[in-house]
Amino acid sequence: MPSPPTQFKLRRIESPAGHIALVTMDNGEDWTKPNTFGEHALRSLEDVLEQLGTPDWRGLLLTGKPFVFAVGADIEEFGEITPERARLGGAAGHELFGRIRELPFITLAAINGAALGGGVEIALHCDYRTISSSVRHFACPEVLLGLIPGWGGTQVIPQLIGAERAVKFIVENPLRQNRMLSAQQAFEAGFADELLEPVEFLDESLAMLIQKIEAGVGKRRPRADLSDVAEVCRKARARLDGQVHGAARAPTGRSI
Amino acid sequence: MAELREVVYIDGVRTAFGRATPDGYFAKTRADDMAVKAVREVLRRNPQLPPEKIDDVVFAATAQVGDQGLTLGRDVALLAGLPKSVPGFAVDRMCAGALTATTAGAGEIAMGAADFVLVGGVEHMGHHPMGEDVDFNPRFIAEQIVDESAAVMGQTAENLHDAFPYLTKKDADAYAVESQRKAGAAWDEGIMDEIVVPMSVFTDDGWTVAARDEFLRPETTMEALAGLRTPFRAGGRVTAGNSAGLTDGATAALIASADAADEIGLAPKMRLVGFAYAGVEPELMGLGPVPATHKVLERAELTMADIGLFEVNEPFAVQVLSWCEGVGIGPDDPRLNAYGGAIACGHPLAATGVRLMAQLARGFRDNQEARYGLTALCIGLGMGAAILWENLQNDA
Ligand SMILES: CC(C)(COP(=O)(O)OP(=O)(O)OC[C@H]1O[C@@H](n2cnc3c(N)ncnc32)[C@H](O)[C@@H]1OP(=O)(O)O)[C@@H](O)C(=O)NCCC(=O)NCCS
């Protein structure tokens, strides 16, 4: 049974700092059917971005339905995929996630539950991140599937946490029995600005966003020092070639 | 026996009150999570109190099943993240649940068995429609122990109109219009924002924030109320407009021994002077607060003239009107429900008591000359509750 498409649901919240866009990713099912990004979901995101074009917004908070943030691309759609559709899907994601990045007000992703692949990437296109300490699945498993985090992950992850950690997160963890990070580990690796208790997670995330707006804190473009990137990649490639012997090709950088 | 100790009210808050319908704020939110929110807000506002000093958590609900069923005080304490050494229990006296939680906690404090007690109530009337799981004993009717109408609160309100024929539907509607207007003004002035803690809630349309009472209709007019249905009796007088709606909400408050509060630097807002519960004919349950009020005043050797503020619950306008009759004040007395009442904000049964206390404490701050105040409400099966408080915010 395919899950119903995930929708981006926009609510306007009145706050002391002005109107906040509270956007929930929700496919209307319980946590056993997590949110995914298929064509419908991307169209829904596009609708929301359209509505965010009016000048009255002061901030955006992006979160998921209870217990789930988002687990990335809709793998059920992969069955029918062609190189052409893959390229289009990639481009659509780039375009929409790029528009999140370019929103003229500050954005915060409140990672309330499982965040995988595209779920991680969409969060990283926001300016700030909180993560609930109850999160147990935070990862980019694409490489295990012979893919790469194609919605900006290969770029924004190293810019946020540096080359060494990025290679570990994007390439080595998936190939180590699909190792995932807990909230604590994700926080320590630099993926989130705050690690918050689950009990009032969304209220506290919202309070943090409002506080940042009131304090006049601006947009953010993390730029880790990546001068070591070539060296880190060379070493990682050597390690991995020894480990997988060409069985998982995408991460080693050869084209499909 | 040890000497009794002074009991003081430190602080109290509530969630916004939502409609108990499938599209209400809290339809998808658990009752105990709402109570947890209120409890954590009380603690957040009173950081001087180390959580391990809390000696008990007393929580009320009328329907003690489902998400209100797990010995609420303890369930809420654990879910709120209080130390596991903090115990808790649950009480039920229907609409007076939170008042009963308060007087039970006060008893522990007065006896020297506790220094700090968290009290409160929650009622998710959407998840637990009134009377749903109740198995009404047939003896009540067979043996005429109570009149059949006693089981339906709205019918007891119609009975009050019968018993006091000069309290007309027009009087009830006029009272309701005023309640709505006063509540609207209190929101406009930011008074309610001090008492109501916003809470994010998941809905079919995504997460949103419940920050304002859903029933509030400050623009209510006599004309609009005149045309409403009378669901409890054909050609009756009780309508959705002059009743409190079916409501989801939670409240929590901190009470303490005066000395213990002083020791850790918590400034009390009110002192508990006394309290009383009383019983009346179940089919006229709305009269309950009349004898409860008389009883508590007599014991304290005070009269109505000594009381500067009244916070009286408003399940039905006629119920307040008959209380006014019984205690000899006018329904337009400025001491009465200055920030509006349940007709405007809703009445989540067992939660309401702390709402009254929180509004009274706020009223004391606005009315330095008021020395005493009363919180009172009526209770199903024919009872009334009244707690008498002394203003501690007027010593300046
Ligand atoms: C009275 C009661 C039955 C009404 O329930 P309801 O019909 O679901 O109430 P609603 O909110 O849908 O209101 C009914 C109508 O009155 C209207 N209305 C309510 N308040 C109004 C107001 N202030 N001004 C104008 N119209 C109003 C509503 O808009 C609605 O109109 P609609 O039918 O055209 O939509 C219900 O609120 C009740 O049982 N209250 C008592 C609760 C109780 O017993 N508590 C315990 C006490 S001890």
Image: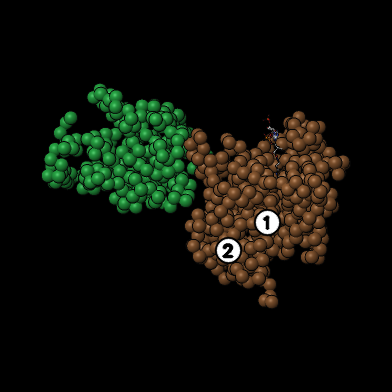
Residue for badge 2: B56
Q: Along the horizontal axis of the image, is B65 left or right of B171?
A: left
Which tint was used for chain B? brown
Residue for badge 1: B99
Q: Residue B238, position in %: x, y?
A: 77, 38
Q: Residue furthest right?
A: B166
In this rendering, the answer to whether A45 lies above or below B266 is above
Q: Which of pointers 1 and 2 lies earlier in the amino acid sequence? A: 2
Amino acid on which disc 1 is placed? Leu
Q: What residue is shown at x 25% (from left), y 45% (from top)?
A: A177
Amino acid on which disc 2 is placed? Asp
Q: Chain of mark 1?
A: B
Nearer to the camera, A135 or B380 = B380
Q: What residue is shown at x 75% (from left), y 58% (from top)?
A: B277
Label 1 beta carbon less than 8 Å to ligand 1: no
Q: Chain of mark 2?
A: B
Coloration mode: by chain
Mark 1, other Cα within 10 Å: few <14 / some 14–19 / many ≥20: many
Q: Secondary structure at mark 2?
A: strand
